[in-house]
Image: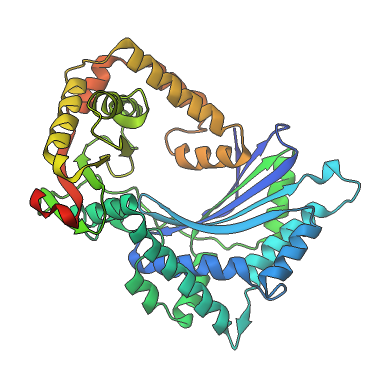
Amino acid sequence: MFQTTSIAKGVNVHVNETTQFKTINFSLKFKDKLTKEKASARSILANVLQHSNEVYPSHTALRMVLDDLYGTSLYIDSSKRGNEHIVTLNVETVNDQYLSEEGVLEKVLNLMYIVLFKPNFENGLFKETIFNREKEAVKQRIESIFDEKTRYAQQRMMELTLPEHPASIQANGTLEEVERVTNEKLLEEYQAMIDDNEIEIYAVGDIQSETIAAYIKEFFHFKDREKSIDAPSVELVQPAQSRVVEYEDMKQGKLHMAFFTPITFYDEKFPVMQLMNGILGGYAHSKLFVNIREKESMAYYVSSSYASQFGLMFVLAGIDSKLEEKAVKLVLEQLEEVKKGNISDTELEQTKALLINQLREALDSARGQIDIYDQYMELTDSFEPDYLISKWKSITKEDIAQAAQQLSLEMTYFLSGKEDDSVE
């Protein structure tokens, strides 16, 4: 799928040579240890680098040069995965094999160099007006979670279940930590990102891997660096409370349940847990949806998700506020059915088919190929999608039941409407 070349210690270039696309996609991923402080600073940094630099100091100026490069797209985002905080520069440009003009690829690589290595400095710091503007933008992004009650409830449950744990840290950090970020602190974080972060660089298109690796080495002079991020600890500490109810001015109740499992991404049974989650609540044919939403007609939505990096599984449901106890009972009943191996052939085969289809659909885009490889490359040497597909196909009902038996409910969090205080 990808050929990997190391251009410096801790800096790898992964190239997928394919005629599948007429464009070339790049992703440069800067990976550092996830903390509230770093997440806050690096989210501001991603904004600052994207919207202004020494050569193109305004978004309009950058927009114009991208248009001149045949509509090249460029954006920087920040995200988290396991113990990692990731700042990613994403670029998609036309393959100049299909143009009469030559040298477009070099111009795009030079623009990527400018964005990363030529920030818009003023007196040795990021330009103050840009810094303040992007700091406010990140604060507004964090505050917006409060208006999305499902996301807010999930965040509150994580803070209560695993306080100070990487699993509960938001990719954008916290309002308090964003407020503490100074221009000097942001400069330190920028220099650490360029000089010390682990870097994974991806390129996908009708290109030669040796040529692209040589270009990247020529344009980006990354120094050697040490690996600083270990796999997440599998040890999860039991939360102080097993049930919490909080109230907001809203009509629909938000039920969130957190389960622990010893099976993580790094366990050989990881593909089994993916199937287990799919059968319980991952899809429209899953037990939770069919039995709680359709047969009982008591949930606006209900689903489950598996956070494999830490060994966590969540069940989320939108319900009337007075139905919390009944909803919890029904969720646990459906989980019990999986634990007993009461899984129909249809449930098993549809779940396998949907997992496989989702993976194959993701591979239809260059960005999907990059995301899949970056997510799964640690599963096995020279990861190929067929590795996961063959694993899923071989899994039995008994395997799934055994995986479900290792789940333990650790926290039930309910966000209720204020008019329904009687539920407490």
Residue 175, given in percent of the width and then of the height, sits at 35, 71
What quarter of the picture does the N terminus occupy?
A: top right
Outermost residue, front side: 419
On the rendered structure, is 221 left or right of 39? right
| Residue 406 visible somewhere in the drawing | no
Judge by depth and name the residue closer to the eye, 143 or 184. Answer: 143
Outermost residue, right side: 100
> Is the image coloured rainbow, by chain, by secondary structure, or in one colour?
rainbow
| Residue 133 visible somewhere in the drawing | yes
Judge by depth and name the residue closer to the eye, 353 or 101. Answer: 353
Count of numbered circles in the view = 0
Outermost residue, top side: 345
For residue 128, above or below residue 409 = below
Outermost residue, bottom side: 123
Q: Residue at x 38, y 77 (%)?
A: 179
Residue 195, given in percent of the width and then of the height, sits at 53, 67
On the rendered structure, is 423 left or right of 259? left
Judge by depth and name the residue closer to the eye, 10 or 266. Answer: 266
Residue 12, given in percent of the width and then of the height, sits at 57, 49
